[in-house]
Amino acid sequence: MHNFQEAGEYIVILISSNESCGGVSYADTLTVLQVSVDITKLEDLIKLYPNPTSGMVTLEIIKPFQSVILVEIINTQGQKIYSVELKTQEIHESVDLSRFPKGIYLVRVISKDWIRSGKLIIGD
């Protein structure tokens, strides 16, 4: 993945090769209309701890939000195992995940303007 620093037209070249088939290349022009400057990470917005967890986790808002946010925890099959809407005044939320199998889960935080994601590990 490449992050463009400014709007404009760019020539993008994709080159693929291997020993048995040789190489193939493809070029195209990409027009970037707007460059996003919001590089906020999930960890800068909320805390989910402990991580790894044996089941009980605390969800804490670090940065106040202007609107309601949706927090989802999703398993490796793409199923939502937890979902909650939080407002700015809701600072702590305890979540019991002990009934779910050990593994890596996706944590997704959604607002009206952005989506951020991270991982949560349920273990011993």
Image (cartoon, grey):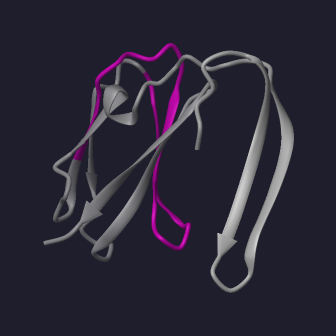
Say which quarter of the image contains residue 23.
bottom right
Q: Which residues make up the magenta segment?
A: 58-87
User: How many labels, in total?
Assistant: 0
Left or right, 110 with reference to 91:
right
- Residue closest to the eye, 116 or 56: 116
Quarter of the figure with residue 60? top left
Is residue 95 left or right of 7 when viewed as pictured?
Answer: left
Q: Residue at x 86, y 35 (%)?
A: 29
Image location (x, y in percent) of residue 59: 28, 39
Residue found farthest to the bottom: 20
Q: Quadrant of residue 19?
A: bottom right
Q: Quadrant of the N terminus?
A: top right
Q: Residue at x 36, y 27 (%)?
A: 45
In reply to whether residue 71 is colored magenta, the answer given is: yes
Quadrant occupied by the C terminus: bottom left
Residue 74 falls left or right of residue 25: left
In this picture, is 63 found above or below 105? Answer: above
Residue drawn 47% across and 70% down?
A: 76
Image: 108 above or below 115:
below
Query: Residue 107, image x and y in percent?
Result: 42, 50
Position above or below: 108 against 91: below
Magenta stretch: residue 111 in it? Answer: no
